[in-house]
Image: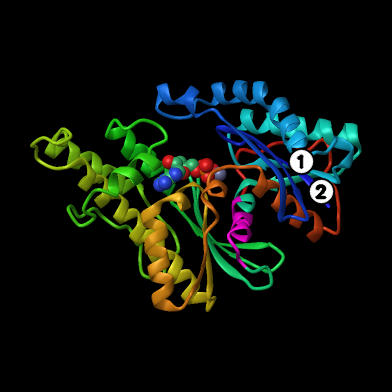
Amino acid sequence: MIVLGIESSCDETAAAVVEDGRNILSDVISSQIAFHTPYGGVVPEIASRKHVEAILPVISQALKDAGLTGRELDAVAVTRGPGLIGALLVGLSAAKAMAYALDRPLIAVNHLEGHMNAAYLGGAPEDRPFVCLVVSGGHTALYEVEPGGASRFLGSTRDDAAGEAFDKVAKLLGLGYPGGVVIDRLAAGGDPRAFSFPRAFLGKDSLEFSFSGLKTSVANFLRRMGPPAPEGGEGAYRLEDLAASFQEAVVDVLIGKLLKAAGDRGIGDIAVVGGVAANRRLRHRLAEAAGERGLALFLPPLRFCTDNAVMIAAAGYSIWKRSGFCRDPLNLDATSRWF
Ligand code: KG4
Ligand code: ZN
């Protein structure tokens, strides 16, 4: 079965063609990051307008790369939510138009389920349950994913998402948007034990997260200590050490909660997906922790950590199969919140 996936929930316009949920025939992403960078974050109105400009060329390119015409598609899968409502509407409207014109099923996909499907692209076996940490700019949540792809929510953040914490701290440090990847790079040259930032575990049985206190703690640190030493110069502290110490606090909590969830449920397979799963320190520490405990760890290739349409096509295919090949109605609405 050949599924076209469409993703437009935030600042990437993406389309991909995937066969049977795994065989990637094309994968096109048009990033808007450059248009949002001057504002230090995603501006929803700009996102909607840029999606409108990019959506048709991106879909055409995905079909061209796959060497297919629309008529050869079996279904159209699209992110329905959660995300920026104006941005979601662009992808959803394009998907509805294609589904209607081609008379193919429309399959609505939850963006988080899309991210979870990227675990299969990282090798997670489909016939065993796994505990999945979804960690992105908008979400930080734990799920138990059953064979077949249905998931059970275990816990999420009470305030900021982990990626949001990376982005906000990067903004405090004047490092630009998006900040996660810049902090990742700086932290590689810093000492993660240079400064001690709070780790919010919220009680020993909790599978919830909280990152707003950590962000405040970094803001207080900056107020107290002033700016870091200029590159190669003298100063109160090194920016690299601050980045590494902040990152370590996030990584400690993410890994602690993921291991707890897997331990509680007696599940030996774990996966981490979403933009923050691209973080090198997190990937390294996860591999260590999984090795020590005899857990099997599955991480998507870097390209499938951040937003993409391959994961939406893959999730769409598994949702479609699970539903007995039903179609969603064409009057379906986008939804900014969807758990
Ligand atoms: O999954 P994604 O592309 O979009 C959402 O669904 O939110 O995730 C984007 C988030 C941003 O907050 C970005 O700063 C973060 O992922 N991110 C990273 C890294 N690469 C992207 N955070 C830490 N380290 C990275 N290498
Ligand atoms: Zn995402």
Residues at discs 2 and 1 in contact (Cβ within 8 Å):
yes
User: Residue 164 versus residue 235: which sits nearer the camera?
Assistant: 235
Whether residue 298 sits left or right of residue 230 in the image: it is right
Res 6 quadrant in image: top right
- Residue interval drawn in magenta: 115-124
Instruction: Name the front one of labels 2 and 1.
Output: 1
Residue tagged 2: 2
Residue tagged 1: 66
Q: Give the crowd class for mark 1: few <14, some 14-19, many >=20 residues within 10 Å.
A: some
Judge whether 127 appears above or below 213 on screen. Answer: below
Q: Amino acid at mark 1?
A: Ala
Colour theme: rainbow
Q: Is residue 206 visible?
A: no
Res 76 quadrant in image: top right
Judge whether 12 appears above or below 116 on screen. Answer: above
**Residue 23, label in figure:** none
Whether residue 80 sits left or right of residue 259 in the image: it is right
Give the alpha-carbon distance from disc 2 to disc 1, as whole Å: 10 Å
User: Residue 240 versus residue 153: which sits nearer the camera?
Assistant: 240
Seen at 53% across and 49% down, the residue is: 305
